[in-house]
Image: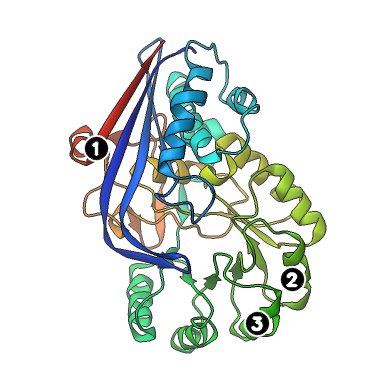
Amino acid sequence: MIIKEVNIRKMKMMMKSPFTTSFGSFQEKEFSLIEVKDELGNTGWGESTAFQSPWYNEETQETSLHMLRDFLIPLVLKKEINHPDEISKLFAPIRKNNMAKASLEGAIWDVYAKRNKLTLAEALGGTAEKIEVGISIGIQNTIDDLIELVRGYIEEGYKRMKVKIKPGHDVEVIRALRQAFPTVPLMADANSAYTLEDIDLLKQLDEFNLTMIEQPLASDDIIDHAKLQKELLTPICLDESIHSLEDARKAFELGSTKIINIKIGRVGGLTEAKKIHDFCMENRIPVWCGGMLESGIGRAHNVALTTLPNFILPGDTSGSSRYWEEDIIIPEVVAENGYITVPTAYGIGYEPNLEAMDRYTVDQFQFKA
């Protein structure tokens, strides 16, 4: 295929409620959509998962746009591409900026699947017809508020609860949840809020039978996580520390992690995500798909990826209505009793709702071969 046109939409959408982590709180979500067109008129869509500020990684929406406009899009325009796996090689001379890379690569995967009359899941090698989904819950004002939220999500059928923790808002929160819900699969996400000086505190979490503690230490660390894992019964799951297959391999060999969260944007695209999945499957490391508060486009990519066989833990890809009054795809992603049915239409399986997109578009850029 030959890429003839790339369009970028800067988007701004208001979430139903604020989302709070150890880094801060926000409700207005800014992101970018990438639309790619080939020489046959097929159209593919991708989404940048970079946030407005560099609190998750070094990227922001503005730096992502800069990389796309000035470096990445020129590398693919007019280029003959046989398979999306070739994109990561084209992008290899450019260091990091994985979320910008993933947004463009994802749109090309969508085009590739449509050209070959495949669902994106099939193009990736996925086989699942439905996927289990959990829920990610930000820090709440009170423990009682959190318990009521969790109770509601359990009633909706979600298969796993992930709650954010931070120093001063951790052991007592998890204890209260476990007392209220003795058997629900529960995990704690620290977003790098702790250090090795907190070992004794983190060891207290072992009594609550957590599925995992996600990224308790520094975002670029795998050495200290190995030291911490030796002290804990609870599995450590790495998120921010894993940017590539090589990172996953090193973390595994060091004993830094027993579970890996795969986020498409964080690792630079679907090709690298699949490589990490395959490595983890070979080495019996469970994986799951983390969320970045995506709109329907990014959510559709997560659904497709999660159909691969080693995604044996429920991910963060909840239904559209969890975050948005109105999503930008037709139909919206629907979670029923904790499952999302994988779409059967070609490509990502959902159609862009162009009228809704227009309502939330704040700027546009077009690039033609």
Q: Earlier in the sequence, mark 3 or mark 1?
A: 3
Residue identified by numbered label 1: 362
Label 3 vs label 1: CA separation? 47 Å
Task: Name the residue at 36% across, 78% down.
Answer: 151
What's under tag 2, amino acid-wise? Gln
Query: Nearer the N terminus, badge 3 or badge 2?
Result: 3
Residue kind at label 1, given as amino acid type: Val
Seen from the viewer's position, the closer of residues 155 and 168 is 168
Q: Of residues 177 and 194, which is closer to you in this image?
A: 194
Left or right for 260, reference 123:
right
Q: Earlier in the sequence, mark 2 or mark 1?
A: 2
- Between the residue at mark 3 and the residue at mark 2, the CA separation in whole angstroms equals 11 Å
Q: Which mark is residue 301?
A: none
Q: Residues within 10 Å of mark 2 (few under 14, many from 20)?
A: some
Query: Image quadrant for the C terminus?
Result: top left
Q: For the residues carrying marks 3 and 1, which lies nearer the camera in this image?
A: 1
> Which residue is rendered at x = 65% and y = 28% of the image?
92
Residue 279: where, in percent of width, then height? 72, 45
Which residue is disc 2 drawn over?
229
